[in-house]
Image (cartoon, rainbow, N blue to C red):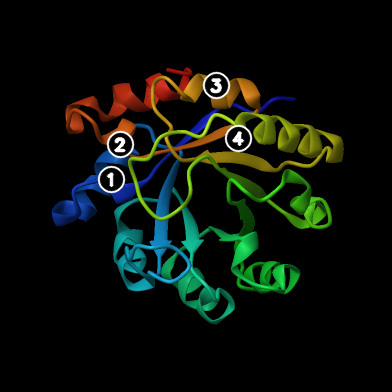
Amino acid sequence: MKKPVRIAPSILASDFSRLNEEVRATADAGADYIHLDVMDGHFVPNISFGASVIKSLRTCTDKIFDVHLMIAPVDPFIEAFADAGAQIITFHAEAGAHTHRTMQAIKAAGCKVGLALNPATPAETVLPLIGELDLILAMTVNPGFGGQSFITSQLDKIAALRAMIDETGRDIDLEVDGGINFETAGKAIDAGADVLVAGTATFTGGRERYAANIERLRNGG
């Protein structure tokens, strides 16, 4: 049975000078998850924030904290992000040699585990691991910066991942991140996505627009 589309606003696109207020406003506007992009300036060419910021935001809402680690190595930091309030920890298949070990560590820390695939990484990468995943994240831009354009060639990968998930019969989120806006949301949903990460599209127009933006994305634009 197809799951409802959920929206995970990326706070990377919000007003950082009022971050607590932005998280509350996004949650109140109907966000399903709060997407927290952690960048280290090494795995990706940018630096965002770490576990201490996530911990400070945890008191703002009881919405699911969907933490996307664009860092390498991953394992030394899992416990800190779990302690900070992450409920889903997603890491990149490209971030280290021992993917399954990292998955085990995330589970041991009490979090759901997600695996992210960069645009050049084939969908088949998830097959040996899919029986233990809670979320698969298809990147539709090269990670590291907000505001990039959706890579349309990734729609075939999303469809392939959807088929793999359906074959298992397991409850696995298929999340898409990168260039999601009112033009591309419907394409991602049609290809099989059921969680959309949206930064700029969520926060455009100010707080009075957040609810309408989220609902529009949920309906495919």
Toward the viewer: 57 or 162? 162
The answer to whether the residue labelled 3 contacts the one labelled 2, judged by CB atoms less than 8 Å apart, is no
Q: Tag 4: residue type?
A: Gln
The answer to whether the residue labelled 4 contacts the one labelled 2, judged by CB atoms less than 8 Å apart, is no
Residue, disc 4: 154
Mark closest to the chain's N terminus, 3 or 2: 3
Residue at 66 percent of width and 74 percent of height: 105
Residue at 82 percent of width and 53 percent of height: 131
Mark closest to the chain's N terminus, 1 or 4: 1
Q: Tag 3: residue type?
A: Lys
Residue, disc 2: 200
Residue 157: image location, x then y, percent: 68, 36
Q: Marks 4/2: CA distance? A: 20 Å
Residue at 48 percent of width and 43 percent of height: 141
Disc 4 vs disc 2: which is toward the camera?
4
Q: Marks 2/1: CA distance? A: 6 Å
Residue at 80 percent of width and 38 percent of height: 164
Q: Marks 3/2: CA distance? A: 17 Å
Mark closest to the chain's N terminus, 2 or 1: 1
Alpha-carbon neighbours of circle 3 within 10 Å: few (<14), some, or many (≥20)?
some
Residue 48: image location, x then y, percent: 32, 63
**Is 70 situated above or below 218?**
below
Q: Helix, strand, or loop for circle 1? A: helix
Q: Marks 1/4: CA distance? A: 23 Å
Q: Is residue 3 left or right of residue 176?
A: right
The answer to whether the residue labelled 2 contacts the one labelled 1, judged by CB atoms less than 8 Å apart, is yes
Q: Is residue 187 left or right of residue 214?
A: right
Q: Tag 1: residue type?
A: Ala
Mark closest to the chain's N terminus, 4 or 2: 4
Disc 3 vs disc 4: which is toward the camera?
4
Residue, disc 1: 13
